[in-house]
């Protein structure tokens, strides 16, 4: 065998190998080796390359035969697909159910992915909202409260806010990677972050969580322990600031409501003190009888943890137009309604992290009857 014949043989074998690219590499290698042995045997008998080629079928026919033998078809683009010949009704039915199963799996995967994407977006937007809201809330807190009073709470809020933000961020990321796992082919690009960088970022995140957790714990403790803390004072009932008693003489207002029918008021009658505070901050009301007050008099003391100047801006006024008497025709008694308005500064309305407590004392005597059933509504 001369060099030219060997070159022709190698060329023919290479073409055949390419035509058989759809087969497994081991099968293809065995076939090429067999044909190589065939060529060498023909050469040993003194045949030339041209004579050997005349005795062989075309490469396309050879490839087609092997594809059919291995149960593989090849389309016009050169792509190959493994095929399975269904020889029975049972196998056909099984194939049908597999298709149905695959359809439901894909449908579930799609719905799950859409849900995961929506959850991911929601969590991420919440994360962004917290990051934006915390600085705004802290600024308002320092405006509404004394610096040293609100400082522990601010430290705690920053720590807890960071922890919650990181938690939401990781939940958002988890939802994203869930979708990525389902549609893996859509996300074939490699991560731009190396393993070393990921390890470093995890270490940094752990340090941030430890610091934030410490801040949250210290802030929570110092905000609730002690009568001088912002929430400890509320727990003990000793608010940090209070206003002077506001005195409301309601003699004329009550007289105008009854308009000479005071005799309808008796021991079973009720008095309702209504406060309109729809846009006012978090409020608590406490009411007690005080016999030392003048007849038909009401006093209100405001207790709060706001700055003294801010708490003094809470204004309480009578709303005499809404006062009225409702006589109960089915039984002895009736109800007297006395209406008040509460107005508060805008910044107190926007950020009310502690309540304002209204301590109300009263002394009502109508038609010679001391009122015993007095209620506050808001």
Image (cartoon, rainbow, N blue to C red):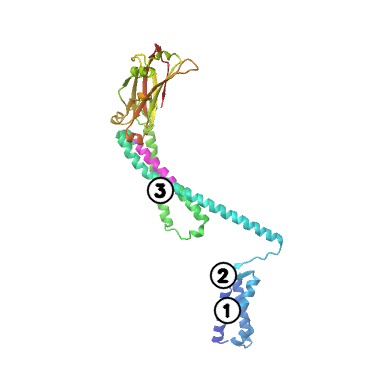
10 Å crowding of disc 3: few (<14), some (14-19), many (20+): few
Taking the image as shown, residue 363 lies to the left or right of residue 92, namely left
Image vertical order of residue 78 relative to residue 329, above or below: below
Q: Give yes or no for residue 157 being in the magenta stretch.
A: yes
10 Å crowding of disc 2: few (<14), some (14-19), many (20+): few
- The image's mark for residue 245 is none
N-term-proximal mark, 3 vs 1: 1
Q: Which residues are magenta?
A: 152-168
Tag 1, which secondary structure? helix
User: Gap between marks 2 and 1, in whole Å?
Assistant: 20 Å
Q: Residue furthest left?
A: 309
Residue beneath label 1, please?
13
N-term-proximal mark, 2 vs 1: 1
- The image's mark for residue 79 is 2
Q: Quadrant of the N terminus?
A: bottom right
User: Gap between marks 3 and 2, in whole Å?
Assistant: 48 Å
Residue beneath label 3, please?
205
Q: Position of residue 173 (x, y in %)?
A: 45, 50
Q: Residue at x 39, y 19 (%)?
A: 288
Q: Nearer the viewer, residue 225 or 343?
A: 343
Q: Nearer the viewer, residue 246 or 262?
A: 262
Image vertical order of residue 95 relative to residue 249, above or below: below
Q: Position of residue 10 (x, y in %)?
A: 56, 81
Circle 3 or circle 2, nearest the eye: 2
Q: Position of residue 133 (x, y in %)?
A: 37, 42
User: Gap between marks 3 and 1, in whole Å?
Assistant: 59 Å
């Amino acid at each position: 065998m001369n060099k030219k014949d060997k070159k022709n043989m190698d060329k023919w074998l290479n073409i055949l190998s390419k035509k058989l690219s759809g087969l497994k590499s081991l099968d293809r290698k065995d076939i090429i080796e067999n044909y190589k042995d065939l060529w060498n045997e023909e050469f040993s008998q003194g045949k030339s390359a041209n004579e050997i080629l005349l005795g062989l079928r075309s490469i396309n026919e050879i490839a087609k035969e092997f594809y059919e033998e291995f149960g593989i078809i090849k389309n016009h683009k050169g792509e190959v697909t493994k095929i399975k010949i269904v020889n029975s009704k049972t196998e056909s039915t099984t194939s049908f159910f597999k298709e149905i199963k695959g359809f439901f799996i894909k449908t579930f995967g799609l719905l799950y992915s859409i849900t995961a994407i929506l959850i991911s977006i929601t969590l991420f937007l919440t994360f962004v909202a917290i990051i934006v809201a915390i600085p705004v809330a802290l600024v308002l807190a320092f405006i509404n409260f004394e610096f040293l009073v609100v400082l522990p709470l601010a430290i705690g809020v920053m720590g807890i806010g960071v922890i919650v933000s990181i938690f939401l961020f990781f939940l958002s990321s988890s939802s994203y990677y869930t979708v990525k796992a389902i549609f893996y082919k859509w996300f074939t690009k490699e991560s731009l972050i190396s393993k070393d960088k990921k390890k470093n970022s995890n270490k940094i995140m752990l340090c941030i969580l430890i610091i934030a957790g410490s801040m949250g714990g210290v802030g929570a403790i110092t905000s609730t322990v002690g009568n001088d803390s912002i929430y400890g004072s509320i727990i003990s009932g000793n608010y940090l600031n209070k206003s002077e008693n506001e005195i409301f003489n309601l003699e004329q207002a009550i007289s105008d409501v009854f308009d000479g029918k005071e005799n309808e008021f008796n021991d079973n009658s009720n008095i309702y003190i209504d406060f309109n505070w729809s846009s006012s901050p978090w409020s608590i009301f406490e009411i007690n009888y005080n016999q030392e007050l003048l007849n038909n008099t009401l006093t209100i003391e405001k207790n709060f943890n706001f700055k003294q100047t801010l708490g003094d801006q809470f204004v309480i006024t009578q709303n005499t137009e809404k006062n009225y008497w409702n006589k109960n025709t089915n039984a002895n008694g009736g109800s007297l309604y006395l209406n008040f308005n509460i107005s508060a500064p805008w910044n107190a309305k926007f950020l009310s992290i502690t309540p304002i407590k209204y301590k109300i004392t009263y002394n009502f005597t109508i038609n010679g009857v001391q009122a015993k059933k007095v209620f506050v509504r808001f």
